[in-house]
Amino acid sequence: MICFPNNEIDSFDFDPALNADKEVIFVSHTHIYTGPVWVWSDDCASAQAVFTCTGCEDTQTVEAAVTQTGNTNTHLIYTAEAAFEDDTYSDTAQKAMGWNMHVSGIQVTGDNCNDVLGDGSVKYDVATNTLTLTDAVIETALRSGDNENEFGIRYNVNRGARLKIVLNGINSIVNTETAGSVVRVFVIAVYNANSSVDCNPLISGSGTLNITLGSDGLTECIGIHSSGSALTVNESRINIGIDGSSSSQGIHANHSIIVENGAQAVITTGSGNGTVSLYARSLSVSEDSSVKVISAVSAVSSVCSLTESTLMLGIDTAPDISGENSAEWDRSASLSSYKYVHIRYVERKASAELSADRVVKGQSLTWTVKVPDDTTWVRFSGTYTDSAGNQVNLTLNYKRTNTAVVITDEPYTSLEVWTVDTRFSYAGTGQSSLQNWSVQYKPKGSKEWLSVMSDDGESELVKTVLVGKTADVLVPPTQGYDKYSLISAVPGKESVSAGERSQVTVMTTDDVSKIRICYVDAATGKTKSYAFQTTSTSVKSLESENGISTWVIDFKFIAPAVDSTYSVQCRGTQWGEAQTFTVTVK
């Protein structure tokens, strides 16, 4: 400190050569330091305590010892201690945790977890490992250090808690602005970083997730990828649509997929090599849920097996993506051979079939009756008018232990098949008797008889049988045709446009209940087959007269056939001989 004349006081760098005219008085000064200002590094790994003198600007900096002393769900707590002038000073700081969770390229941390995207649509609760989407719009994006793979949501598990994704409202994830360096896109990817940890991801909530992707120009494109032991969709609706000609998968699960509690999944993929809409080792669909998978290549992977309960649901398949001519899967071919697969609950109704509608008096016909597997009794009720004009009622009761009854299981259903031979006769001397028969059954513990209903579900099923005194009486008006015969097949037009619908009129004997139209696709060389039953919506009319049925079928001519030739067959116990017709498809 310099003391000038007139008692002025100032501080400066004193140089005797330059300040010889000044009187210099040196005054002693004791530093008194205030409590420290703490300076922490960004990662909280180090800290400094800075002390400043109250009488001058002198500062003393002390390196502190830093230790982690605690944590919250979202932050780590560090404590720094510094010794100065025989005292110890301490301070705490928090560092936001960062998790192996990225949303649209943004790492989820303790600082942003309550609003990851800044618009209130994405929230992460680390305590329950739950990511909640509420009307979120997410764009796939690169994450730091990765220039080839884009993700909508990426999670690499390193903790034991199950990953839960909750959907509220309508949420969408798209890849509309894929970077030029990107070769793969994963909309939702869940990886197990540690093989001993299973994230077992769960997608739940009453909301919807719409995934829309374009695969062109990419090596691989996947809607949802999971390496956990089971990917579960509970209650939510998932719609995945992937267009393009590159390899794509709607859902790829290394192990199993479970769809339950009213959940619905609709998955469509394109035409790229190796494309499949659903890849998994096993698939389980609950009775109140549904899965529809469509692909220009393969709807379901060849390694995927269905659980026993799923096999009991209704499973419709079709060889083309339209699914217009889908039919219930008969298990003769793997699901991977179809481009359209729809799995959902179908009510299995009791039914009854009779081996013929004509029989000689005193001979037997065979009933094939499908009823619930807890049925204890089956009853056949018949009625006819005798030669005197009196109504005669007949009743035949069969208990499941009756030796005349053969009972077998109906695979993958809760039904069983009762096979019963019954003898037909009538009273009087008439040449024939036209009889109407219905079928009832009684479940275990029930006192009431339940009727086997017709296909419309509104009226009781009735089988009409002509009982003749001799075989000559039973010769139908269509004498000369064998059973299950195809009589003719005539197209409505000789020339149609591709994709146009046109009528095809087919005549068969009236015992035919199923026909099919086949052709060889001129472009691919593959055989296309479309089956029609009496109840098919494409059968616009079906009239029977004198033992002849006329089918009018609204048929879609999708593509040209080889030699413009189409074949028609009808089915009895097997597909019969074909007849052909020609139509030019332009």
Image (tube, rainbow, N blue to C red):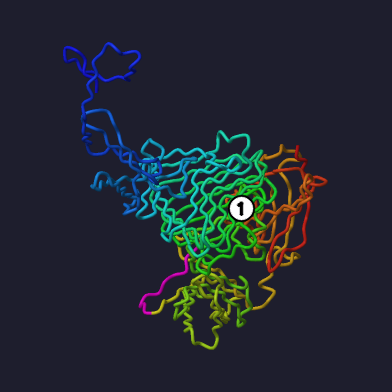
Residue at image x 42%, y 45%?
108
- As drawn, 548 above or below 44: below
Residue 452 lies within the magenta run? yes
Residue 168, can we see it? Answer: no
Say left or right for 113 vs 565.
left
**Closer to the camera, 220 or 555?**
220
User: Measured from the top left, where is residue 197 in percent x and y?
Assistant: 48, 63
Which amino acid type is shown beneath numbered disc 1?
Tyr
Residue at image x 26%, y 39%?
36
Give the secondary structure at mark 1. strand
Residue 4, can we see it? Answer: yes
**Closer to the camera, 275 or 453?**
275
Say left or right for 396 vs 336.
left
- Residue lying farthest right? 563
Q: Quadrant of the N terminus?
A: top left
User: Measured from the top left, where is residue 103 in percent x and y?
Assistant: 46, 43
Residue at image x 36%, y 45%?
95
User: Measured from the top left, where is residue 332 in percent x and y?
Assistant: 66, 66
User: Please, what is the dominant secondary structure of the magenta stretch?
Assistant: loop
**Closer to the camera, 373 or 189?**
189
- As drawn, 46 above or below 408: above
Say left or right for 521 vs 555.
right
Residue carrying label 1: 340
Residue stretch rendered in magenta on the structure: 445-454
Residue 121 lies within the magenta run? no
